[in-house]
Image (tube, grey):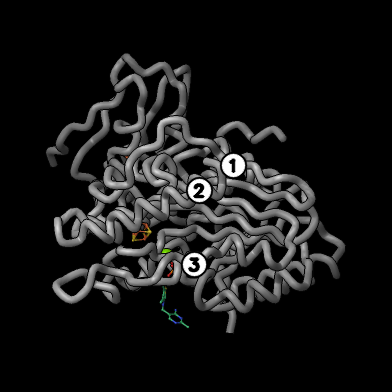
Amino acid sequence: MVLAERENLLAAGHRACPGCGAAIALRQILRALGRDTIVVSATGCVETFTSPYGMSAWEVPWIHSLFENSASVASGVHAALEFLREKSSVVVISGDGGTFDIGMGAMSGMFERKQNITYICYDNEAYMNTGVQGSSATPYGSSTTTTPAGKASFGKIQPKKDMPAIALAHDVDYVATASIAYPQDLMKKVAKTKEIYGPKYIQVHTPCTIGWGFDSSKTVEVGKLAVETGLVPIYEVEKGKPMVVKKVKNKKPVEEYLRFQTRFRHLLKEEQKDIANQIQAICDKNIERFGI
Amino acid sequence: MIGAVCKAAGSLQYKTGTWRDNRPEVTDKCNGCGICETFCPDSCITIENKKCIIDYDYCKGCGICANECVRKAIVMREERK
Ligand SMILES: Cc1ncc(C[n+]2csc(CCOP(=O)(O)OP(=O)(O)O)c2C)c(N)n1
Ligand code: SF4
Ligand code: SF4
Ligand SMILES: [Mg+2]
């Protein structure tokens, strides 16, 4: 698969925060997909920052669904293309709230129908567009406005939902995780979806400067640390083939990742040491389970 | 009800460069490898003649390009308006 040389299908002038990881993801995803693509997006930061009226940043056909039904709208687009006997990649690009929480039923239906659609979740691990509320993608111990850390709480008490495993349980044709910090890997995976007929799910880790609390210049650095600590495993499962996992040679202690972000910084206090240790245990378990 | 916009890249009307506090400046250490272009969230870097060119009409000054450049070829300077 040869990627178009530095083709850019997300125009400048969009209104993402400076240093937005989701905007980086969009550029890389669209480069790998190419022009012959129709994108559906649920409500969320990506939808909002790319689409003030008359000032769309998209250079491919794009449709905004509701928050909960991007997968159903994509199914409709797919059915229309089949009726017209036209070919185009149909791709959902929705946030973690729109995927893990409110849109999960619609996505499950789309997987069940076995339509040729790629569902990409950009995972910034909370509801960012409405002001950093926790989602089921928010990691354990993270402080958000609905899981605030303070005297009575250490942040989110539930672990992150394993959405790729849920996608795999639908027996879909391709499931992968990726990160904006590893663009070649991400673009290779997205490009691969064009060669596989059937439903596909890709989850892209996209750091958010506002919601996670780090300097706008550090987005890629934070993304790398998430992978290097084992907290965010990067892998792909193509139907009928063994899982391929991104190995990490020099693994870093998760404290380096936690220290970087205000959403976790409360865990560095002596009295929260237990919680930090439990997050390290999640990393260790990932490292063992996936063979990172 | 359906609202539709037919114009692609209408966002170009809106110059996000006015948001910038710090300006990335490309020094002659740059060899045009393109790492910064891959990571710029704002589609404002192009590579021409083995050098990266920054479009200051849209650059928001996030500093990712300077942070990720392996040659340290981009330096961030405070913007004076
Ligand atoms: C049915 C419904 N409920 C609530 C909202 C308000 N809302 C808009 S965007 C958003 C959060 C989106 O979160 P996510 O999908 O994670 O995307 P992000 O903003 O983080 O990129 C919410 C709650 C809505 N638009 N529709
Ligand atoms: S809040 Fe986060 S995800 Fe939303 S535009 Fe800003 S940096 Fe991007
Ligand atoms: S400072 Fe940010 S927006 Fe400006 S060119 Fe560098 S990466 Fe792009
Ligand atoms: Mg989100």
Query: Relative to the observer, which residue lies in front, A233 or B38?
Result: A233
Chain letter of disc 3 in the image: A
Chain letter for the residue marked with disc 2 in the picture: A
Q: To which residue does mark 1 refer?
A: A245
Residue at figure coordinates x 27%, y 68% from the top left: A155
Tag shown at residue A86: none
Q: Is residue A152 something that shows in the picture?
A: yes
Q: What subunit carries mark 1?
A: A
Mark identifier at residue A233:
2
Name the residue tied to disc 3. Answer: A161
Disc 2 to disc 1, C-alpha distance: 8 Å
Which of the two labelled residues, at mark 2 and mark 1, occupies the earlier sequence position?
2
Q: Do we see residue A23 in this rendering?
A: no
| Mark nearer the N terminus (3 vs 2) | 3
Which residue type does callout 1 highlight?
Val
Label 1 CA crowd tier, 10 Å (few <14, some 14–19, many 20+): some
Q: Are marks 2 and 1 in contact (CB under 8 Å)?
A: yes
Sequence-first tag of 3 and 1: 3
* In the image, the residue with mark 1 has its CB under 8 Å from the nearest atom of ligand 4: no
Tell me the distance, in whole angstroms, between the alpha carbons under discs 3 and 2: 13 Å
Q: Quarter holding the N terminus of chain B?
A: bottom right
Give the class, few, some or many, for how many residues have Cα within 10 Å of label 2's Cα (few <14, many ≥20): many
Q: Amino acid at mark 3?
A: Lys
Q: Position of residue A36 (x, y in %)?
A: 70, 50
Amino acid residing under circle 2: Pro
Indicate if the residue with disc 2 has its beta carbon within 8 Å of ligand 4. Answer: no
Residue at coordinates 12% horizontally, 38% vertically from top-left? B80
Give the x, y percent position of residue A129. 36, 68
